[in-house]
Amino acid sequence: MFTNLNVFRMAKAMAVHAGQRQAIIAQNVANADTPGYQARDLTSFADNFQQRNRTGFLQASRASHLNTDSSGSQELSGSKMNLESDPNDNSVSIEQEMLKAAEAKRQHDRAIAIYKSSLTIIRTSLGRA
């Protein structure tokens, strides 16, 4: 009964998105001095979620439903940012990457808080608080 609740799937998707964004931000910082490197970023979780719903994204209720992969998830891909470049044609700004990293951490913390709150509500409803 409580195995596939949407709130848990949404919290997991938000945490995964934050982790993937953090990985891209780390790549940007690691390549801050690489000539010709263009900074990348993911679309926001809200935009990605709205786009999937707008394009008729259907949610699978079981693995064989809708011919999706076994997890029912979609791959998130990074997109290049159109930022000003420095003389070596590198568009990474350490300050912007630090701000994006803090935002990704807040998103991950929010996802964990949603997960914990939902778990607490379920435990309370079962009388196991």
Image: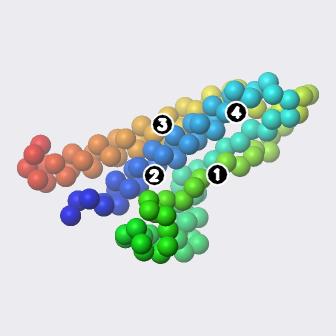
For marks 3 and 2 on the same chain, the one whose residue lies earlier in the sequence: 2
In space, the residues marked 3 and 2 are separated at their CA atoms by: 14 Å
The amino acid pointed to by label 1 is Ser
In space, the residues marked 4 and 3 are separated at their CA atoms by: 19 Å
Kindly identify which residue carries mark 4. 28
Please determine whether, in this image, residue 56 is positioned above or below residue 102: below
> Callout 4: 10 Å neighbours few (<14), some, many (20+)?
many
Q: Nearer the observer, disc 3 or disc 2? A: 2
Please determine whether, in this image, residue 14 is positioned above or below residue 72: above
Q: Nearer the observer, disc 1 or disc 3? A: 1
Q: Quick check: can you spot residue 107?
A: yes
Q: Is residue 117 left or right of residue 11?
A: left
Q: Quick check: can you spot residue 96?
A: no
Kindly identify which residue carries mark 1. 77
Q: In which quarter of the image is residue 26?
A: top right
The amino acid pointed to by label 4 is Asn
Pick the quarter of the image with the N terminus.
bottom left
Residue 58 point in image, percent of width and height: 48, 72
Which residue: 75% across, 46% down? Answer: 80
Kindly identify which residue carries mark 2. 13
In space, the residues marked 2 and 1 are separated at their CA atoms by: 14 Å
54 or 60, which lies in front? 60
